[in-house]
Amino acid sequence: MKKLLLLLLAVFTGTSVFAQWSLTGCYDIDPITGLGTKGDTVLAATAERFYLSADQGETWNDLWNGLPYFGHCSAILTDGSTLYVGTDDGVYVSHNNGDTFVLQNNGYAGATIKCLLKNGNTILAGTYNYGFTSGVLFQSQNQGQTWQCISNSMNPNVHKVNCIALNGSTILTGTNYNLFASNNNGVTWTPKSTGMGLIEVTALAITGNHLYCGTTNGIFLSDNAGESWSLCTNGLTGNEWISSLKVINGHVFAGCSNGGGVMLLRSFESEWVNISAGLNSMQILNLSANDQYIFAGTYAIPGFNTGGVFRQELAALVGINEYGSSTNSIQVIPNPMNNTITIQLPNDFQNSIFSMYNTAGQVVIQSEIQNRNTILNVSGLQKGIFYWELNTQKYIEKGKVVIW
């Protein structure tokens, strides 16, 4: 058995069939600075061009229809058939799924749009103030037709709003000068940075009572509505430059712009894991998702790789049943395990393929299962979290185990 396992390790190590990104047809010599999804529609942008896919990234077309050349888009917001594209000029709005766009910046006095968020009937736009404009956060209550500044009372050192999030009725803004919150629609702002120090906040995400704050030096977590924060070091180094945070069904995805790729904290785990297998660039600028895929926009490095939109099926990343939840009475025990693993199948079992993957998505063990009770030797594997998949002719079951 040990020789068989060593052979399987030699054959399958490095094969990433569990969590593998693939490049879509959208790639450019420039970084993908803007990314958004709406059903099967995916929008992507660089400093010079706009792209649209109507089939989840399979095929792409250039998108103009009123959008600017050299527009430098960093924010895309989708709301039904209405699309909002934030650029250097302001916000371009389409009410017909992108067939035509119109610049709507009446009352807008900001500079480059960094982020967009919908709050009921209100659209919020965070900007990068270069010093010759007024205000860094604007709102529109009529689908972008008119805008007003709501950041006048924010700290005067704030010249950039990188991200916006809503925690109930509270507006949270991540800025170059920490995190600020407003409970009265921007009339007053309160700093919320205890435990973070003076740091630039680049991304925000909320799931349940957990608030995640991405910064230029790691991810911080708050369980008390932002009153205090602690640095996440469970699987993270603490010096990641976080460009994007995305919550999908309680799972938190983090894009790193300093070469860290994409990290994932699954809702049933306590450790962040790197899921970057398949990416040709570890510099992630943005993340977006629909019901089937998560998409990542990457940074272009001249002479090495182009910028591109990558995608991966969410089911391969977070469609994992926790141990003990199998509806087919499959058991993989013990858990945690040490030297051996026992696979117990139901009475109606058929010949199956059992695979184990590390957190990078690499196959570390694969074996054909021909008996209801099969014992495999796992003593050659390092301690940590692993995922298993049992593929039969009737179904595919997945789960996770811990080797200690």
Image (tube, helix red, strand yellow):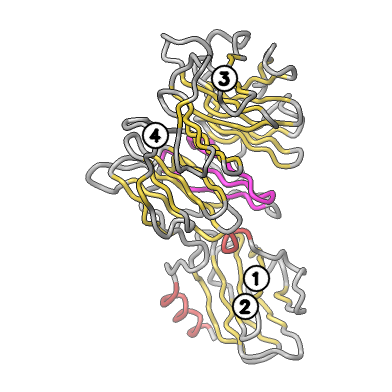
Q: Which of 263/162 is in front?
A: 162
Magenta part of the protein: which range?
Answer: 238-266
Q: CA distance from mark 1 to mark 4?
A: 45 Å
Mark linked to residue 390 = 2
Q: Amino acid at mark 2?
A: Leu
Where 375 sits versus 281, above or below?
below
Tell which circle, 3 or 1, labels the residue nearer the N-terminal end.
3
> Which residue type carries mark 4?
Leu
Say which quarter of the image contains residue 402: bottom right
Cα separation, mark 2 vs mark 1, equals: 6 Å
Confirm whether the magenta stretch covers residue 256. yes
Mark whose residue sits in front, 4 or 2: 4
- According to the picture, the residue beneath numbered tag 3 turns out to be 146
Q: Element type at marker 2?
A: strand
Q: State the residue position of label 1.
A: 398
Question: What SS does tag 1 mark?
Answer: strand
Type of the residue with mark 3: Thr
Callout in the foreground (3, 2): 3
Residue labelled with disc 4: 67
Q: Residues within 10 Å of mark 1 (few under 14, many from 20)?
A: many
Q: Which badge, 2 or 1, is on the more N-terminal residue? A: 2
Secondary structure type for disc 4: loop
Q: Residue 4 in the image: state x and y as whole percent.
A: 49, 85
* Badge 3 or badge 2: first in the primary sequence: 3
Do the CB atoms of the residues marked 3 and 1 lie less than 8 Å apart? no
Earlier along the polypeptide chain: callout 4 or callout 2?
4
The x and y percentages for residue 164 are 60, 29
Which numbered mark, 1 or 4, is in the foreground of this view?
Answer: 4
- Give the CA distance from mark 3 to mark 1: 51 Å
Q: What type of secondary structure mainly makes up the magenta span?
A: strand
Query: Dot 3, crowdedness within 10 Å: few (<14), some or many (≥20)?
Result: some
